[in-house]
Image (spheres, helix red, strand yellow):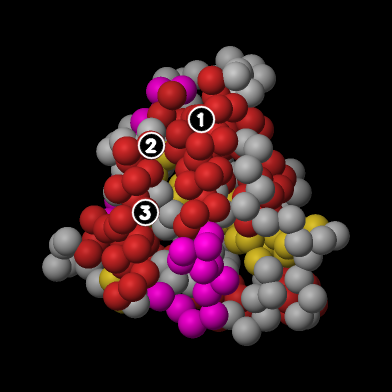
């Protein structure tokens, strides 16, 4: 296993937002460390505890004693998935930064598909259940009502201003470090709609976004309510459009999308 030192250049950061995930997070952490530990590249795993009250933080701290690449971060109160991911991205040191859900719905091995897209020139590579569901080489296990409403949701999202992306909400996304710093430094949405904000702003800043089919399996215990949270996310997107028109997403610094590190 690659040993991690504070002064060492980190190749990959994995950011996992966690809210009351004591029943699901340890198997995924074990899967991630086993997979990444076989690589000859330094990595870190940032678990951002979003004000959990079920012992999630204690479990992660205990896991860290045998896996020093794990870095627990804890928010004092529950602030939302968007805030938790942003906290992790801004603390991450990796040249490439992966966002992954704590339930392990997307196997960590799917990272290789996103890395291939980055290697081909993308600035952001996002997992897509929609594309995977139309390709027999992949397996997508989702409850039928979530698939139906998810497809309707993404059709509306494309119509409202994020064209060309069939699955904005898959929680498996890989960013170049410079791109992550730019987008998360400008982000305002704290809830589930943060994915829409990132992609909306990324498209308008000219970042290259690759949508990649990935294997995915619905996990019991989802905290997303399809209708209620779907409506909230659409309202978030409308707010993002207003904010963009009002200049709320002006870059804090000039970030080049051509002079960025290559994935090796």
Which quarter of the figure is the N terminus placed in?
Answer: bottom right
Q: Which residue is mark 3?
A: 153
Which quarter of the figure is the C terminus placed in?
Answer: top left
**Distance from the alpha carbon under mark 3 to that under mark 1:** 17 Å
The residue that appears at 35% across and 60% down in the rendered structure is 150
* Magenta span: 205-229
The residue that appears at 14% across and 68% down in the rendered structure is 136
Q: How many marks?
A: 3
Q: Which residue is mark 1?
A: 241
Q: Residue 128: in sight, yes or no?
A: no
Precedes in sequence: disc 1 or disc 2:
2
Q: Residue most toward the right?
A: 76
Q: In the figure, is residue 34 to the left or right of 208?
A: right
Label 1 Cα neighbours within 10 Å, binned few <14 / some 14-19 / many ≥20 = some
**Distance from the alpha carbon under mark 3 to that under mark 2:** 10 Å
| CB within 8 Å, label 3 to label 1 | no
| CB within 8 Å, label 1 to label 2 | yes
Precedes in sequence: disc 3 or disc 2:
3
The residue that appears at 29% across and 66% down in the rendered structure is 148
Q: Residue most toward the top?
A: 254
Residue 263: x and y in percent read 42, 40
**Which element carries disc 2, helix, strand or loop?**
helix
Label 2 Cα neighbours within 10 Å, binned few <14 / some 14-19 / many ≥20 = few
Q: Which residue is mark 2?
A: 160
**Distance from the alpha carbon under mark 1 to that under mark 2:** 9 Å
């Amino acid at each position: 296993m690659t040993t991690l030192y504070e002064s060492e250049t980190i190749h990959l950061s994995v950011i996992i937002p966690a809210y009351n995930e004591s029943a699901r997070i340890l198997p995924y952490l074990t899967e991630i460390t086993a997979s990444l530990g076989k690589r000859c590249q330094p990595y870190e795993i940032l678990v951002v505890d979003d004000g959990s009250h079920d012992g999630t933080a204690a479990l992660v701290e205990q896991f860290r004693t045998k896996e020093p690449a794990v870095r627990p971060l804890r928010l004092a109160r529950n602030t939302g998935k968007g805030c938790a991911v942003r906290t992790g991205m801004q603390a991450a040191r990796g040249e490439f930064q992966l966002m992954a859900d704590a339930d392990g719905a997307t196997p960590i091995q799917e990272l290789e598909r996103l890395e291939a897209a980055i290697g081909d020139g993308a600035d952001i590579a996002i997992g897509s259940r929609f594309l995977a569901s139309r390709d027999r080489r992949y397996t997508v296990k989702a409850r039928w009502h979530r698939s139906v409403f998810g497809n309707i949701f993404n059709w509306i999202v494309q119509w409202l201003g994020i064209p060309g992306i069939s699955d904005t909400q898959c929680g498996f996304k890989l960013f170049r470090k410079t791109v992550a710093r730019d987008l998360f430094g400008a982000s305002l949405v704290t809830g589930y709609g943060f994915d829409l904000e990132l992609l909306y702003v990324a498209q308008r800043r000219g970042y290259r976004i690759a949508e990649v089919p990935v294997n995915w399996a619905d996990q019991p215990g989802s905290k997303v309510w399809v209708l209620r949270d779907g409506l909230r996310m659409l309202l978030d997107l409308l707010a993002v459009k207003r904010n963009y028109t009002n200049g709320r997403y002006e870059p804090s610094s000039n970030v080049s999308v051509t002079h960025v590190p290559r994935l090796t």
